[in-house]
Image (spheres, rainbow, N blue to C red):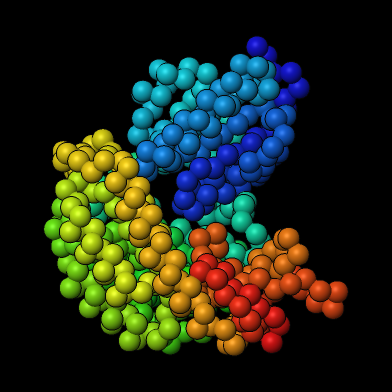
Amino acid sequence: MRARSSNPRKVNVVTLGCAKNMYDSEQLMAQLRANDFDVEHESRVDDFGIVVINTCGFIESAKQESIDTILRFAQAKKEGAVEKVYVTGCLSQRYEEELSEGIPEVDAWFGTRDLPRLLKTLRADYKKELVGERLLTTPAHYAYLKIAEGCDRPCAFCAIPLMRGKHVSTPIEDLVKSAEALANQGVRELILIAQDLTYYGLDIYKERRLAELVRALEGVEGIDWIRLHYAFPSGFPMDVIDVMAESKKVCDYLDMPLQHASDSILKSMRRGITQEKTESLLADIRARVPGIAIRTTLIVGFPGETEDDHANLLDWIGRMKFERLGCFTYSHEENTHAYNLEDDVPEEVKKKRVDEVMELQAGISEELNLRHIGKVFKVMIDRCEGGFWLGRTEYDSPDVDNEVRIPVADDLHLRVGDFVKVKITGATAFDLDGELA
């Protein structure tokens, strides 16, 4: 059926998955806008001639969400609500052949590095002068900055190298230009992302250059905060922590997915590190940057994980007292090294273990947050909602960490993107309450 009233130059970009996918969508949107397309991100109005779905294929739940979204727009095309449906991103990179057979309504499929081909299909020019420029989907005061693509790590559970390829660093000078452009748009916080931040520079400079990159970004006028996401523990470059300790711009915050604590599971996961070495690394980081907030993510239910392994993990979490922690159940992914192992932990056991980890972490988080009562923090205001101004300290990343709630008042004149001093007056496991200091 032909679309009833769709505009053939109006594009709705739908993004699923992580911040790295969001970054890719923002680059696509900037290219489309430069080609005089009317482009929006995740519009709720079905009057678009074209829908581009940027998919995630990391774990089973993410794959299912991507497939459900594709099917929804495939049905919209059948009903004439849209004219063209294109799919890009990780799921498309990994499963194009199977998906194209099962969902023929999709007009074309593209991989994670197919931006020029996607634009050509849309009859848009790929403008090289726009490389690094994006149409931001985040609030105007913060933005993600992807410093590398792909991953060279051999983690047994991970399909990212299958979807994103080998690690490719973006040169420092290009990233500084991108940061300057973002600062000119009003961005005040840069959140550095990659599949593995700590590998940065090895491919193009033959040595780790993350610390040098961070120093270069420090010099960008208008940027007040620089935040580091997705660091790998094995071979961690400690000079980055030295820069953090010295800098007023680099947040005392580090996102380092550690995945597990049991030596047998870490070995089976091919993480290249032991519990003892991990604890030594964490102690060194905390000694160099007292008060640093370390965020980690863990996987439970990996093949062969015993009750003793899980008990070890719980004991370790209790001793490490991570400021921020997330937990996921293991997903048995085709063509990964772990796929050769028997997925022998029942699903209900995996879910029970997640619940136990998160219940333990809730207690730790509340204990740590209660210590903040009476202290004054620098807070970035993100939005106003439900009678509160909501913001974050340097110890919190958007969407995943604590928020600071400040009651709205007639005499309180704040703006999104403002930095303010806030005295903490109350705390729960995952949020803080405060008032202007």
Quadrant housing residue 95: top left
Specify whether residue 63 is in view.
Answer: yes
Residue at 66%, 71% in the rendered image: 405
Quadrant housing residue 296: bottom left
Percent x, y for residue 283?
28, 81
Q: Furthest-top residue in view?
A: 1
Residue 182 as seen in the image, left or right of residue 322:
right
Looking at the image, is 156 positioned above or below residue 122? below
Q: Along the line of sight, which residue is nearer the eye, 24 or 177?
A: 24
Q: Along the line of sight, which residue is nearer the eye, 415 or 207?
A: 415
Q: Along the line of sight, which residue is nearer the eye, 324 or 153?
A: 324
Looking at the image, is 109 positioned above or below residue 172? above
Looking at the image, is 24 positioned above or below residue 46? below
Residue at 17%, 59% in the rendered image: 308
Q: Quadrant of the N terminus?
A: top right
Residue 55 as seen in the image, left or right of residue 419:
left
Q: Furthest-right residue in view?
A: 410
Residue 295 as seen in the image, left or right of residue 374:
left
Percent x, y for residue 394?
53, 76
Residue at 32%, 72% in the rendered image: 318
Q: Quadrant of the C terminus?
A: bottom right
Specify whether residue 197 is in view.
Answer: no
Percent x, y for residue 340?
16, 38
Percent x, y for residue 435?
70, 80
Residue at 54%, 42% in the rendered image: 15
Q: Along the line of sight, which residue is nearer the eye, 356 or 24?
A: 356
